[in-house]
Each structure stands twice: as C-alpha cells, then as structure tokens.
Amino acid sequence: MVVHKQGNDARMMTQIIIPSDCGNAPKKNFLKDFYTAWAKDDLDFCKKHLDDHIIWEIVGQNTLSGIENFEKQLQHYPIRNASKMVIETIITHGTDASVDGQIWTNEGAVFAFCDVYKFKGFKGFSLKSIKSFWVELPTGSGCRGN
C-alpha cells in the first residue's frame, strides 16, 4: 500500500506494508488504521482515539501526558517523516496490544520500533497509554522490508 500525504511532492508519499490477517480482530484493524493515519499525518484520526489524559512513554527519552503534549511530540517523531513503514506484528489481548516494525525516513535513517498500548476499556478504541521503544539502526542493516 502506498499512502499519499497532503501535497504532490514525491517526498510526501509513504509506502506502508502491513500483514493481512483473518480480519476478525477489531483492535488489530484499528491499529492498522491508526498507523496508516500516523503515516498520512492524519492527526485528527489519531487524536479522536486518545484518552484526554493519554500517557506516552518514549523509553529512554521522556514521558508525556495529555493530547496537546502528544501532538507536540509527534511533530518530531520519525513516523511523520517516513518514506516507508513495515508493520511486522500486531498482537492484541483484552485491553493490551503491541505493534512492531520498521520505519525508513526521507533522510535515510532506519528505526526499529515496538509500541505497547493500553486501551481504556475492553470495548471501543480509546487509547489510555502508549509505551514506545525505538532504536535507530545502521543504514544497510538488512532489516526486513528493505
């Protein structure tokens, strides 16, 4: 799947590779949509699925709370500048979920990531917290999707 961001510039396209599954896991489908929205810079979609008091821990960097701080931090997050994103795995169970994969930025950096999610409840798609692990990889490291 190739996602076009706003604008006609070639730098504004992100290739997104997401595994297909049996399609009967609503939270998996939601997380596919959430990552696609992130890559498309569709902050409205992302924000409408965040609890007002969202906690976002970026391991080794900082912990933020609230939608406003989430949006400010997102301005500097590699996914917003991605030329390619590969989702390897989406796991959900009850109110917990995790997503892992790789991001290639327009500047040529490569990141491996794993994000761990807590949903506000068993029903619905409101995110209560996110814990993000991001590691910048050496270019040409042979990560999948290259």
Image (tube, grey):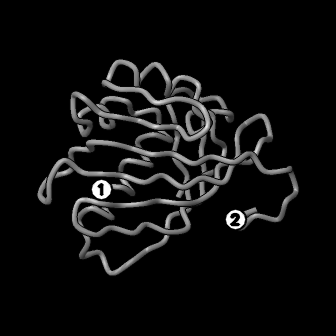
- Secondary structure beneath disc 1? helix
Q: In screen coordinates, is 103 left or right of 57? A: right
Quarter of the C terminus within the rendering: bottom right
- Neighbours of disc 2 within 10 Å: few (<14), some (14-19), many (20+): some
Q: Please say if 104 is above or below 74.
A: below
Question: CB under 8 Å between callouts 1 and 2?
Answer: no
In front of the other: 101 or 51 = 51
Would you name the residue on which mark 2 appears?
145
> For this view, does 107 lie left or right of residue 30?
right
Q: In the figure, 13 relative to 19: above or below? A: above
- Residue 42 % position (x, y): 39, 33
Q: Secondary structure at mark 2?
A: loop
| Residue kind at label 1, given as amino acid type | Phe
Write the residue at 50% across / 69% down.
89
Q: Which quadrant holds residue 102?
A: bottom right
Residue 30: mark in rendering: 1
Q: Residue at x 46, y 37 (%)?
A: 57
Q: Residue at x 59, y 59 (%)?
A: 101
Q: Is residue 17 above or below residue 22?
A: above
Task: Name the residue type under label 2.
Answer: Gly
Instruction: Give the camera-side residue of 55 and 146.
Output: 55
The image shows residue 79 at horizontal and vertical percentages of 57, 39
Question: Does label 1 or label 2 sit earlier along the sequence?
Answer: 1
- Percent across and percent down for residue 136 are 74, 45
Residue visible at 60% across and 40% down in the picture: 13
Q: CA distance from mark 1 to mark 2?
A: 22 Å
